[in-house]
Amino acid sequence: MNKLTNRWKNRLPFLGWAAVITGAGLALAVGQKVDPVAAEPSTGATLAAASSVGERTSRLPASFAPVVKEVAPSVVQVFTSRTIAPAGFPDRPGTGDPFFRWFFGPQFEERGLRRGQPMPRQQGIGSGVVVTPDGYILTNNHVVEGADEVKVKLQDGREFTAAVVGRDPKTDVAVLKANGEELPHIAMADSDAIEVGDFVLAIGNPFGIGQTVTMGMVSAKGRGNMGLDYEDFIQTDAAINPGNSGGALVDTAGHLIGINTAILSRSGGNQGIGFAIPTNLARFVMDSLVRDGRISRGYLGVLIQDVTPTLAKEFGLTEPRGALVGDVNPGGPAGRAGVENGDVIVEFDGKEVRDSRQLKLTVAQTRPGAEVPVKVLRDGKAKTLEVKLAELPGDPQVARADAPNAKDQGTLNGVVVSDLDSRARRQLDAPANLSGALVTDVAPDSAALEAGLRPGDVILEINRRPVRTADDAIRLTEKAKDRTTLVRVWRDGHSRYVVVDETRAS
């Protein structure tokens, strides 16, 4: 049983973003679950690191063949498959959102889900990058999201069934694990060291035709406003097309500097504006998922905004930089440290703060509990405060799952839950004192759906034990004694019991 993470929100305008997501070009694997596998880090899980990017020169080399020969074997094709919604529950934009299911009611999704009806499959194609010799692979969340099965194929023809160690929709990063030894892998460079104008190579599997290499340069750094919660994209003009998602963006020394993710296009094909997730961000996500099985983000406890030239003048700043504090949670880390409304945060942990987006990203990548110096400008004077970060509240946690082919001891498989927040309470018209785990998705071929569990239900009890949060629900379904689960749920102002029998499904 897995806990929901926030989906990719705020879809981008159609005209400017005909092909924002480039992975799984023929058929994207979509879903809302976060279902990482309990992968214990091994010595090989330590990422190969490169201390610098490629040597900068004013002349274009005669050939990039030596670099390609070195790094291409570490770039893999990713093949996914999943069960799709049957006839009567069309797979079109909006129908996968729990809001639509709550609005139209259970009958909207029940048509075509009768026992015995074959469930159609959807295939997806993308790319990935092997970053450790024992088979840890970086790719995009949207490449493997919702997939029932993931396979990877190496350049030498070897194929592996890959486990999804974890996914982070907030950064569009996913980590896979292939059970191999001494696999070709690539060293990760410090992506902060790259500069606009550096030559780069994009390696991936566009349109499923096979491994392809394109060349370009770093067009810009620190791009955002793409619809993700945490963004710091590298922009490049190296040709990136559907199927390239999850592939490698490397420097001229053969070091990984980014994971190719998206394109800006009016036609759906390459128009010279591609985006890659920098390795420093991907490394943070991977380390967290492999080590902890979840993403733990730092929390400062402030509402911030960019400093415009007009605001800079009003606050006595010589230039529009930093993050302006509009509101402070008095009980949060910043409030306890003395940060006030109207402060402009110009440094965090010794690093210059350019704008609010950068500060948000930097705080998120700092481990909760860390004590960091925060430099603010208040009434034109600099002041440094020591802030002990907390963990971001309400951040959906990634639950562990069993490794492929391992004995599954969990129950309520195919059910996705999240905490019952204020927004969900308003949508459901739920009373303020109601506590439980909100069901946000139920797999169409699951025993839970057959038993009557639906998105929008609030789980109150599991096997007569109270459920107050999504973590409670996950804990109570791990290592179950048997495959029959008694679930008490709240729906439409009333509570009822359902029995989920997974013995027939197994």
Image (cartoon, grey):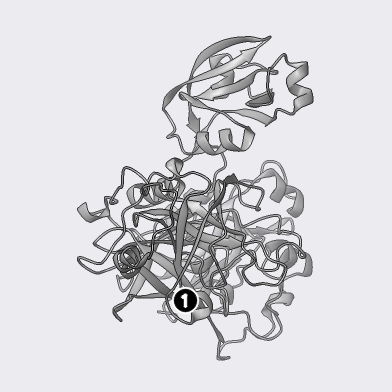
Q: Nearer the viewer, residue 375 or 166?
A: 375
> From what the image shows, is residue 55 above or below residue 300?
below
Left-right relation of 72 to 459: left
The amino acid type found where label 1 is placed reads Thr
Residue 261, horizontal then vertical, whole percent: 54, 61
Which residue shows up at 59% across the image and 80% down it?
84
**Total marks in image:** 1
Judging by the rendered image, the residue that carries numbered circle 1 is 80
Whether residue 270 is visible, yes or no, is yes
Image coords of residue 407 (percent x, y): 30, 70
Q: For this rendering, which residue is in front, 46 or 70?
A: 70
Quadrant assignment for the C terminus: bottom left
Kindly identify the residue that appears in the image at 57 percent across and 59 percent down: 237
Q: Where does the image place residue 271, in percent across and percent down from the top left? A: 65, 66
Percent coordinates x, y for residue 500 in the rendering: 51, 71
- Asked if residue 268 lies left or right of residue 220, the reply is right
Residue 68 vs 476, above or below: the answer is: below
Q: Is 273 on the left-hand or right-hand side of 389?
A: right
